[in-house]
Amino acid sequence: MTLMKLFPTPVEMVPLERLYLNHNLRAVRDPSRAFVYTNFIASLDGRIALECPRTGTAVVPGEIANPRDWRLFEELAAQADVLLTTGRYMRQLARGDAQAILPLSEEPAYQDLRDWRRAQGLAAQPAVVVLSASLDIPLMEPLIGRHGRVYIATGSDVDAARIGAIEAQGARVIVAGQGRRVRGQALIEALRGEGLNLIYSTAGPKVLATLLSDRVLDRLYLTQVHRVLGSESYDTLVEGQRLYPPADVQLHSLYYDAPGEASPGQLFASYAVTPL
Ligand SMILES: NC(=O)c1ccc[n+]([C@@H]2O[C@H](COP(=O)([O-])OP(=O)(O)OC[C@H]3O[C@@H](n4cnc5c(N)ncnc54)[C@H](OP(=O)(O)O)[C@@H]3O)[C@@H](O)[C@H]2O)c1
């Protein structure tokens, strides 16, 4: 399982396994601040999710999801102190419509990643933060059972009774923003206060908009599958207000995964977000 590394040069063949583990995020980050990263897979025409005809909810289309990309998604998760997810994902999980449970996977193929975490002295699973304005969040018990530390992040417009009800289930509430929405900087500061410094967003376009507009994202991992999907109803990378100024990024790494029997080929790119 090899790929062609195109950037940084020299161009050379590299193994897929450990590709993103070798980015070594825990070692390269500035210890005086958090490191926030995210990962998306998109079609050539920029679709990250399409409506599933069976359930009517948006999911990552099977035409682009693939095990090689998933391996890298898991390698990024293995390095995290905490995963960001959303109330919407929790509702999808409760209905049985979610694409997968949150990493780290317990499949044998990912045993090396679980071993890697243990060798680093990390908890078996990263902690989880669920961002939610609605606080309509079902199914917390299995999540707490698996990940241990679970936080619900919301805005200040939340009443004490609701906080009490959530905390009675074993999750902690983080108030990080005014009104009902979470603000990126307040969230990252609160997580640092909990000793959670490697922050991996597995969430979608609204959370990416929050992280970019509040200028807290450090790195974007983006897989671009060489396939055009079309469709009138779709999600793309960012959803929210126009960014003023726009967020610029610099290419950090680029790998070419050549077409195979089941795959049209794809590019694995990562970008460093340029600070203002
Ligand atoms: N292709 C990919 O790589 C990829 C990656 C991630 C997600 N996706 C897809 O993108 C779609 C949306 O995913 P998603 O729900 O994870 O992400 P999202 O669009 O970023 O977030 C949606 C939900 O998160 C909560 N939320 C987001 N930002 C918030 C903020 N600033 N403050 C408070 N709450 C906030 C809200 O929950 P409440 O409704 O509970 O208030 C909102 O409904 C899905 O179809 C998913 O499959 C694709």
Image (cartoon, rainbow, N blue to C red):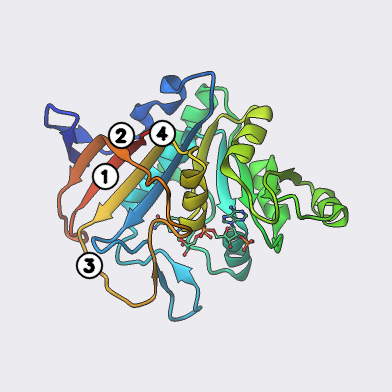
Provide the residue designation for mark 4. 276
Q: Badge 1 is on which residue?
A: 268
The answer to whether 173 appears left or right of 90 in the picture is right
Q: Position of residue 244 (x, y in %)?
A: 42, 48
Q: Which residue is mark 3?
A: 228
**Tag nearer the camera, 4 or 3:** 4
Residue 152: x and y, percent? Answer: 69, 49
Disc 4 to disc 3, C-alpha distance? 33 Å
Q: Give the secondary structure at mark 3.
A: loop
Mark 2 lies on residue: 19
Please rate how many residues cluster around mark 2, counting C-alpha atoms within 10 Å: few if below 14, some from 14 to 19, many from 20. Answer: some
Assess mark 2: CB under 8 A from ligand 1?
A: no
* CB of mark 3 near ligand 1 (< 8 Å): no
Q: Circle 1 sits in a helix, a strand or a loop, which is it?
A: strand
The residue nearer to you, when weighing 70 against 43, is 43
Label 4 to label 1: alpha-carbon separation: 25 Å
Query: Neighbour class for label 4 at 10 Å: few (<14), some, many (≥20)?
Result: few
Q: Give the amino acid type for the residue marked by disc 2 in the picture.
A: Leu
Q: Residue at x 67, y 35 (%)?
A: 190
Pointer 3: residues within 10 angstroms few (<14), some, or many (20+)? some
Residue type of the residue flagged with mark 3: Val
Write the residue at 43% across / 74% down.
Answer: 51
Image location (x, y in percent) of residue 54:
47, 80
Q: Residue at x 48, y 46 (%)?
A: 213
Spatial CA distance of label 1 from label 3 is 17 Å
Q: CA distance from mark 2 to mark 3?
A: 26 Å
- Three-letter amino acid code of the residue under disc 1: Phe
Q: Of all residues shown, which one is farthest toward the front? A: 244
Quadrant of res 6: top left
Mark 1 to mark 2 CA distance (whole Å)? 10 Å
Residue 155 seen by the camera: yes
